[in-house]
Amino acid sequence: MSDHADTKALIHAIDQLREQNERLTERVDDLEHNLEQTEDRVETLETENEQLRDRLEDCEHETTRIDALTDAARKRSGVNKQRIEELQARELEKGAHLLAETVDHCEIDVDGDRLEQLTKDDGQTYYRVPQSEDPLERGGSITLSHGDLLPIQQLARMDDEMLRSTSNALPTRLAAKLWKARTDSSIGDNPWERGCKDIAEYVKASDLKHWIRRQEPGTSDTYAKKLVSRTIDAMLDLSKNRVAIRKRTERKNGLEYTERRLILPEDVDIPGETLSQPTEAPETAGVRG
């Protein structure tokens, strides 16, 4: 009886151990499964972390690039502001009247270090050198600031050094000089000719080629021909199409040929050249030192 009881107890203990082993095996399986999931999650996080590091590096590079561009733009803006102030100072000393809102009077360096404010009959305020009359004798209701001028007029007012620093394109510089030759009698070398009917002035392509070779000594005839077309294109663009191109049949040595002409129409509106004459003197608003 005792042996039977012992055997039964042993079998029961074995069954319990087997059940416990099965539970432990299941627990180990669960832990191994959880470990695999954790390892997969860690691997995913490491991949995402690496991707974020790459994006952060790209962002840092882009930020550095943008900072460099911003700094360069700020420097260019400062240089351009200085150029505009220098040009404004020159124009003011020549007697120009400039809209007050376009002039930083604290930075303008003019002879005497004084600018005078005046209000014209358009109700707007302008700056001028004290008691200077408008050299173009424009009306009290209209005056020109630097921004009122056509791009070609702005460039034509620059000296050679400023023009070269403003544009590195030779056709642009030649267009500015060509316009200046038309309006400034002191230049001397003026290829423009007076027109008739609906044409105020014109310059022949052939004459423009010779003029370019005089302006740029050493320029070959072939290259000068290319510069004629490029200079005309620049003139059209910078004058906002105030000038135009026309072809005309010419005769030379009994032979006919067609030649391009760069023309300035008689009725075209050129700032400072087509404005009415003044009727009364402007009112002085004050003097700024």
Image (cartoon, rainbow, N blue to C red):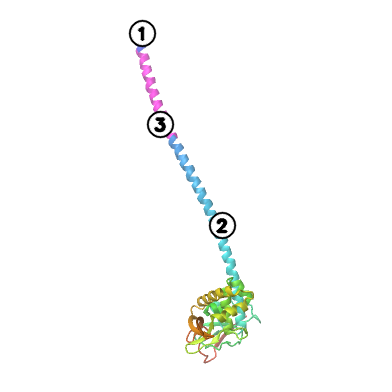
Q: As displayed, is residue 10 above or below residue 245?
A: above
Quadrant where the C terminus sits is bottom right
Mark 2 to mark 3 CA distance (whole Å)? 50 Å
Question: Who's the residue at 50% across and 51% down the image?
Answer: 55
Q: Are marks 3 and 1 in contact (CB under 8 Å)?
A: no
Q: Is residue 31 magenta?
A: yes
Image coordinates for residue 21, horizontal then vertical, percent = 40, 23
Residue 40: x and y in percent read 45, 38
Going by the picture, which residue comes out furthest to the front? 254
* Residue 104 is a magenta residue: no
Q: Is residue 278 left or right of residue 108?
A: left
Q: Which mark is residue 122?
A: none
State if disc 3 and disc 2 touch (CB < 8 Å).
Answer: no
**Which stretch is magenta?**
8-35
The amino acid at mark 3 is Asp
Q: Secondary structure at mark 2?
A: helix
Q: What mark, if any, has residue 3 been given in the picture?
A: 1
Q: Residue at x 49, y 42 (%)?
A: 46
The N terminus, quarter of image:
top left
Task: Please name the residue that numbered disc 2 is placed on.
Answer: 64
Could you tell whether 117 is left or right of 9 in the image?
right
Identify which amino acid the numbered label 1 is placed on.
Answer: Asp
Name the mark nearer the viewer: 1 or 2: 2
Which residue bears the numbered disc 3? 30
Cα–Cα span, label 3 and label 1: 40 Å
